[in-house]
């Protein structure tokens, strides 16, 4: 499980802030979900034969002997949340959450055992309009993050569980002919979860799949219509996408629309966001049915994409330096006065001794635009020397009682 360093965390925070505002713009409400759920929830909803349940969950017995699992994904828990809180039946909900997910995987760039997701789930809407809205919202987020040029949308429909059953048989019948040539994982999946083979990274398997039957030919009429309508809405909105009939998603609960946002900038870990429709999920959980659709995006991968684009804004706007015990005491008060007087301003005080020159070097490294300098002279005449760190100009002297309004003007000019 990775440690997240300050620079990385700042990017996570930035993504969260942008996402928060985009989600609010579409009427989504944030909820808080627990990190632990009953193991049974994931086994039943995500599916016994999925990668997640087969080999990626952190599962343990608690002191009471109940089997709990650190959530590997958010949709199952969100459906449970909706059901237990009476938010689903005959209601429309647009919900979102943020937090860590846990999967026992081989750690590498863009793949960690603890990673952050923002997920959104919509309940009570069966039509393609909400699918389209969700994708438009995703696109707006990529635009606001400055990533729209780096991602593409791949879209598919996997129909209903019945039509998928018919397709599965055709696929298995085709693949059986090449069983010995398939990669090991795919051979195993032939009997457990054959559609997952479409996802295989093996080149040989992919070559075999070129002539395999396509799921598009097995769709039931309603699913076909739903998908056509969705595509039409995206066309109307000018949102580019590519239909990729090999996208099946790894989880059992999906039906009809499935999609992935993919980037080519992160190597093998190219999927930054994935989701789809799960109309049977609530009923499968034992609730009265409610259609659903949602997505989850990985903050860690988005952060890797943004790392090269975002310039660090440092840790401070104002850096306070002082020399001598008395000046230090005054400096401490001055720093508090400025924090009191200018909301949100980041004021860092130099703690400890040091020559002015050395302290100003630290001031420069902090990213601050102003250094406030206090020495014997300033203390004696109740003033503060103000040094511009990012523009030329002489150091100026400011009386202490005018300092707050000086800083306010300096940082909020042009607001
Ligand atoms: P992959 O095919 O890369 O394993 P996935 O299909 O397992 O992805 P989802 O379950 O759809 O992923 O999760 C949604 C998003 O969460 C992914 O698109 C990705 O951005 C992120 N994600 C999933 N697993 C990890 C992980 N182990 N580390 C970091 N991010 C992850
Ligand atoms: Mg995975």
Image: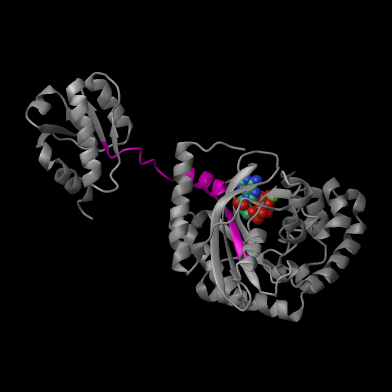
Please say which color scheme the image uses: one colour
x, y (%) of residue 301? 57, 47
Which of the image's four quarters has the C terminus? bottom left
Q: Quadrant of the N terminus?
A: top right
Question: Does the segment drawn in magenta span residue 184?
Answer: no
Q: Residue furthest left?
A: 381
Q: Is residue 308 magenta?
A: yes
Closest to the observer, 59 or 124: 59
Q: Position of residue 215 (x, y in %)?
A: 77, 68
Question: Residue 176: horizontal and vertical position, in percent?
Answer: 92, 58
Q: Is residue 283 visible?
A: yes
In the rendered structure, the answer to whether residue 263 lies left or right of residue 405 reads: right
> Vertically, is 60 above or below 283?
above
In the displayed structure image, the side of residue 310 where residue 242 appears, left or right: right
Start-end of magenta stretch: 294-318
| Placement of 193 over or under 354, stated as above or below | below
């Amino acid at each position: 499980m990775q440690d997240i360093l300050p620079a990385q965390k700042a990017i996570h925070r930035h993504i969260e802030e942008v996402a928060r505002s985009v989600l609010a713009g579409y009427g989504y409400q944030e909820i808080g979900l627990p990190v632990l759920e009953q193991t049974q929830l994931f086994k039943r909803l995500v599916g016994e034969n999925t990668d997640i349940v087969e080999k990626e969950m952190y599962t343990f017995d608690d002191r009471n002997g109940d089997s709990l699992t650190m959530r590997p994904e958010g949709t199952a828990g969100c459906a449970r949340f909706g059901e237990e809180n009476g938010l689903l039946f005959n209601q429309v909900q647009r919900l979102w959450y943020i937090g860590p997910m846990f999967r026992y995987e081989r750690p590498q760039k863009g793949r960690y055992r603890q990673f952050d997701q923002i997920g959104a789930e919509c309940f009570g809407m069966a039509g393609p309009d909400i699918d389209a809205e969700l994708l438009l919202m995703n696109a707006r987020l990529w635009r606001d993050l400055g990533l729209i040029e780096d991602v593409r949308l791949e879209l598919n429909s996997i129909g209903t569980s019945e039509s998928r059953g018919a397709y599965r048989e055709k696929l298995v019948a085709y693949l059986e002919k090449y069983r010995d040539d398939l990669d090991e994982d795919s051979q195993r999946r032939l009997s457990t979860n054959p559609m997952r083979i479409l996802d295989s990274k093996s080149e040989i398997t992919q070559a075999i799949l070129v002539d395999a039957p396509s799921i598009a030919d097995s769709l039931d009429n309603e699913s076909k219509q739903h998908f056509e309508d969705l595509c039409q809405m995206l066309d109307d909105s000018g949102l580019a996408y590519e239909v990729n009939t090999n996208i099946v998603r790894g989880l059992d609960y999906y039906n009809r629309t499935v999609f992935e946002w993919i980037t080519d900038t992160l190597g093998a870990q190219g999927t930054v966001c994935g989701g789809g429709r799960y109309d049977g999920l609530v009923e499968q959980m034992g609730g009265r049915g409610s259609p659903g659709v949602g997505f989850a995006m990985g903050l860690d991968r988005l952060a890797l994409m943004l790392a090269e684009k975002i310039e660090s804004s440092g840790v401070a706007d104002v850096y306070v330096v002082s020399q001598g015990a008395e000046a230090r005491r005054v400096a401490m008060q001055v720093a508090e006065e400025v924090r009191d007087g200018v909301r949100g301003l980041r004021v860092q005080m130099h703690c400890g001794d040091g020559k002015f020159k050395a302290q100003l070097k630290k001031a420069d490294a902090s990213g601050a635009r102003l250094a406030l300098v206090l020495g014997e002279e300033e203390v004696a005449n109740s003033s503060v020397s103000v040094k511009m760190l990012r523009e030329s100009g002489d150091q100026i002297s400011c009386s202490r009682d005018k300092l707050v309004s000086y800083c306010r003007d300096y940082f909020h000019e042009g607001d």
